[in-house]
Amino acid sequence: MKRSILMLMLVSIVILMLSSCASGPPTIPIWPYKEYKLVTEQTQTKNGMTIDVEPLTPENTYKHPELYAFDLDQLPKYFQGGMVSGGFPIGLQGKRWQYTFGFENDFIVAMKVKITNNTDHILRMGDARIYLRIEDEEPIAAVANLGDPTALVDADKKVHIRSAYDGDESLIHWVTYFEEQWDKKRVKQMFDLGYPVGLTSQIINIHKKKYKLINDMEKEILPGDTYSGILFFPALISYDKVNVKFYDVVTKTDPAGNPIEKTTFDFEFKYNENKLWYDRDAKQWKGGEPPVQPTS
């Protein structure tokens, strides 16, 4: 029976109960997911500017506790019980974990980016434009604002997230939007406790200092400095090939600081399908094929 896996760290209560009562070894939970893998080099350097891109995928979740690890008491009370407390077990580092850029088999294009300025001038991100390019489609601009994760409760006691309610095109808005769409179509279990839409925004809020957006147009990078952050596009991973392009990155200025040379960085990605399996002993999801289970 195919079950609905809420997000990366969600282990279905019903499945665990059934597997513990069944004869023989318990079934190993497996989670297929979609990702974009880099075709070009991860790190590119041009005229003193270096850009390093790391696609964010479910498999590298444990590499980034600063993005995905959380404790129940860090969440607003509304998000602490029911499906959250029961469905997100304590795992590595004594934390609960949630991948914030995907829901079951719908994954959003996101990556960590590090920009190093080895020129002799200030890099103004306001001069650059960053787009997701898809063949025969309009370019998609990188999101520039984190948004407002404030939870609003209406007269029917339904919770809305401020940025999603306002539709402000921020990261919080888009993550919550895809979360809502996923919740509408997910397969409901017999004893389904209901999923609190907005949970992902609250986990992002816990780590908001680490969700700096590279496409923040007000950011300046001084000579010799490095700036790291998130590059996020409001698009699901579905196309065979995409390119992430950094246009008009200023690599040379005149004595007055006016741009006299601009460079484009181009990172190509291809679609890939991968899978994770849940290691109950280690309390974590692992990439690749699960171990072969002995037959009874």
Image (tube, rainbow, N blue to C red):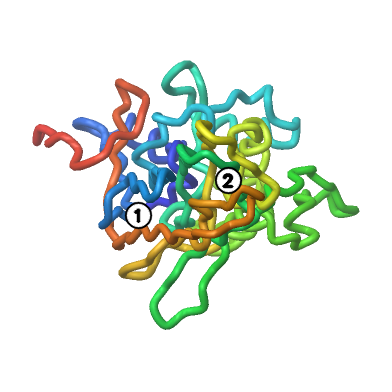
Identify the residue at image location x=44%, y=70%. 133
Which of disc 1 and disc 2 is earlier in sequence?
1
Amino acid bearing label 2: Leu
Q: Position of residue 150 (x, y in %)?
A: 79, 43
Along the line of sight, the residue nearer the viewer: 228 or 171: 228
Amino acid bearing label 1: Glu
**Residue 35: which numbered mark, if any?**
1
Quick one: SS at disc 2?
Answer: strand
Crowding at dot 2, Cα within 10 Å, few <14 / some 14-19 / many 20+, comes out as many
Q: In the picture provided, is 242 more to the left or to the right than 258?
A: left
Along the line of sight, the residue nearer the viewer: 191 or 153: 153
Crowding at dot 1, Cα within 10 Å, few <14 / some 14-19 / many 20+, comes out as many
Residue tagged 2: 123
Q: Position of residue 152 (x, y in %)?
A: 83, 47
Identify the residue at image location x=27%, y=55%. 40
**Residue 230: which numbered mark, if any?**
none
Identify the residue at image location x=84%, y=47%. 153
Q: CA distance from mark 2 to mark 1?
A: 31 Å
Q: Position of residue 196 (x, y in %)?
A: 66, 45
Which residue sits furthest front? 255
Q: In the picture provided, is 285 more to the left or to the right than 121?
A: left
Along the line of sight, the residue nearer the viewer: 267 or 64: 267
As drawn, 93 above or below 96: above
Identify the residue at image location x=74%, y=32%. 76
**Residue 87 seen in the figure:** no
Quick one: SS at disc 1?
Answer: strand
Q: Position of residue 249 (x, y in %)?
A: 51, 56
